[in-house]
Image (cartoon, rainbow, N blue to C red):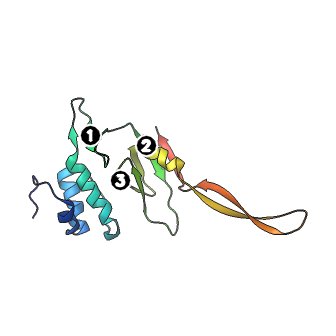
Amino acid sequence: MVNPMAKLTKAKLEAMSATEIADILKNEHGIEVDVDDENKGALVEQVLAAQTAKPNDTGKVTTKSSGGKAATKSKKTKILIGEQEGEADYVFVGVNGRQYQIPRGKEVEVPAEVVQVLRDAVTEKFETKTDPKTGQKYSKPKMVPRFNFQVITE
């Protein structure tokens, strides 16, 4: 059993199962997560970030980013990311050294910066076109949103 007051190292966390890490997040930090061995790395990062969180003089929570600077908790936005066949049940988003695992098909609150990353995420698709003069087919690139999501409340 892990001492709840002890700060866990990355090595200790990586030696644990995904279920044990999820229990630590829930019991010690009040964070509910879906348990999946494939997302164990993200769970480790969440515990490490939660361990460094502390209230500041304004009562807001700050966390250490990978750059070593404190980041103040920002305004929350409620979103819904659509489910897609053949895609994972969650979307990973990284902002300023913080990792977010966002479930698909559920309304969730995320920082405004995460919404901006989702808006900026695009992928290149190719459309097949036919040249009207020559009848020759060619591919034309088109930038499309990577994630199907909607903002519920800002």
Q: In the picture provided, is 139 more to the left or to the right than 26?
A: right
Give the camera-side residue of 10 and 83: 10
Give how far across and how far down residue 72 sits, in percent.
31, 37
Q: CA distance from mark 2 to mark 3?
A: 12 Å
Which structural element holds mark 2?
A: helix
- Secondary element under disc 1, as helix, strand or loop, is strand
- Report if residue 35 is visible in the image: no
Q: Amino acid at mark 2?
A: Glu
Q: Quadrant of the N terminus?
A: bottom left
Among the two numbered marks 2 and 3 on one chain, the one whose residue lies closer to the N terminus: 3
Q: Position of residue 149 (x, y in %)?
A: 52, 51
Q: Could you tell me which residue is drawn at 62 percent across and 59 percent down?
A: 124
Instruction: Tell me the number on the disc at residue 113.
Output: 2
- What numbered label is drawn on residue 133? none
Residue drawn 22% across the image and 62% down it:
21
- Which mark sits nearer the N-terminus, 1 or 3? 1
Location of residue 47 (image quadrant): bottom left
Instruction: Tell me the amino acid under the disc marked 3.
Output: Gln
Q: Amino acid at mark 1?
A: Thr
Other-residue count near label 2 (Cα within 10 Å), few / some / many at <14 / 14–19 / ≥20: some
Which residue lies at the image location 26% right of the left edge and 35% below the top edge? 60
* Mark 1 to mark 3 CA distance (whole Å): 15 Å
For disc 1, the marked residue is 62
Q: In the rendered structure, are the residues bearing label 2 and label 3 in contact, judged by CB atoms less than 8 Å apart?
A: no
Give the percent coordinates (x, y) of residue 120: 53, 48
Query: What secondary structure is found at the residue carrying circle 3?
Result: strand
How far apart are labels 1 and 2 at the CA level? 15 Å
> Is residue 84 toward the left or the right of residue 126 in the image?
left
Choose top left, top right, bottom left or bottom right for residue 9.
bottom left
Find residue 99 and name its label: 3
Residue 63 in the figure: left or right of residue 89: left
Near mark 3 (Cα within 10 A), the count class, few <14, some 14-19 or many ≥20, is some
